[in-house]
Amino acid sequence: MELQGNQNNMACFLQPEAARAIDVIRYGVITVTPKTRVYQALACIVDLNISGLPVVDEQMRLAGVITEKDLLSLLYEKQSTRGFVETYMKSDIVSFETDTSLEEICQCLLNHSFRRVPIILRGKVISVISRTDLLRVNLHKFVAPEQMYGANSHASLPAWQVMKKSLITVRPDSPLSEAIALMADYSLSGLPVTDGKIHLVGMITEKDVMPYFYNRQTPPTMVRDLMTADIVTFGPNDSIIEICECLIENQFRRVPIVKDGALIGLISRADVIRYILKNIARVSQFRAAQVVQQMIWRP
């Protein structure tokens, strides 16, 4: 099996003005070849929870499609996954060019049983568009006014839903070598610094210690000597959206979550990415509200 392009199931974010396939496609597509073994295609469809895979030749030209329905039928009738994709794929399939209107693609997906269509550029498969992609693009049309303009439009996205609770921390009087070893062992960019009551007093990061790697200056010995005490924190009920915007606008990769001065969690950029990918509809709803509000208040 050949995985072409991005192997992640990347989300298609809100685009209210999208009108053509090229406006919403995700470049990079997972494909198989006619000579891919059936069990490999099956594993891909099951692991990625997708309804089908484009079948392409060595030049990425579309040769067919194999679907979960085809594979289900094979398993039910033969209780076997032997053979190659070319034996079970469909060759007579519908595809669209990148300049095709989304309305035309939508009508096609309404009129047929398949859930996704390949998108072609210069004769090569570059992406697919699914019914779910069209749901995401059109979500803003179904958001009620009170959801669009309400003051608490993102109150249902609290930080506690995302934060990591199992934390590795150090104390101000911990040896600096201990903090460095923890960051190295666990591939962490930084560590919270807490007192004996788990109250947050600072952060120590890889960047704080890097100036001492390749010079002759004697490095400090304690965490307190290099930690940053003035740090940005959030509460457990603060919005994930606000945290996302903070992590975009600043250089640090994670923020502590604090309640009554005590550290209760951490949220990193990667944590927010994972949350968005799993909750794209709710995030898109909030982004829709932002777009409309910007239109209203635009001078």
Image (cartoon, rainbow, N blue to C red):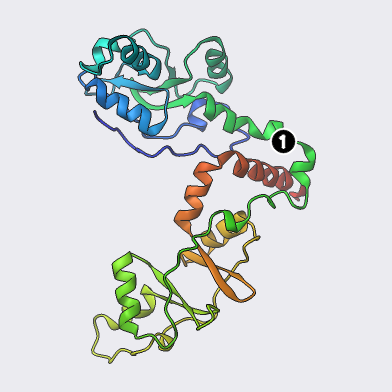
- Crowd class of label 1 (few under 14; some 14 to 19; many from 20; radius 10 Å): some
- Residue of label 1: 143
Residue at (28% x, 33% y) in the render:
3
User: Residue 80: x, y in percent?
Assistant: 25, 16
Query: Looking at the picture, which amino acid does disc 1 mark?
Result: Val
In the picture shown, does residue 82 fall above or below 196?
A: above
Res 145 quadrant in image: top right
Picture quarter with the N terminus = top left
In the picture shown, does residue 276 fall above or below 36?
A: below
Give the left or right position of residue 37, taking residue 211 as reference: left
User: Residue 106: x, y in percent?
Assistant: 56, 19
The extreme bottom residue here reads 218
In the picture shown, does residue 33 fall above or below 26?
A: above
Residue at (22% x, 22% y) in the render:
37
Give the left or right position of residue 55, taking residue 201 as reference: left
User: Residue 188: x, y in percent?
Assistant: 37, 66
- Describe the element under mark 1 as helix, strand or loop: loop
Decide if residue 18 is in sight here. no
Decide if residue 53 is in sight here. yes
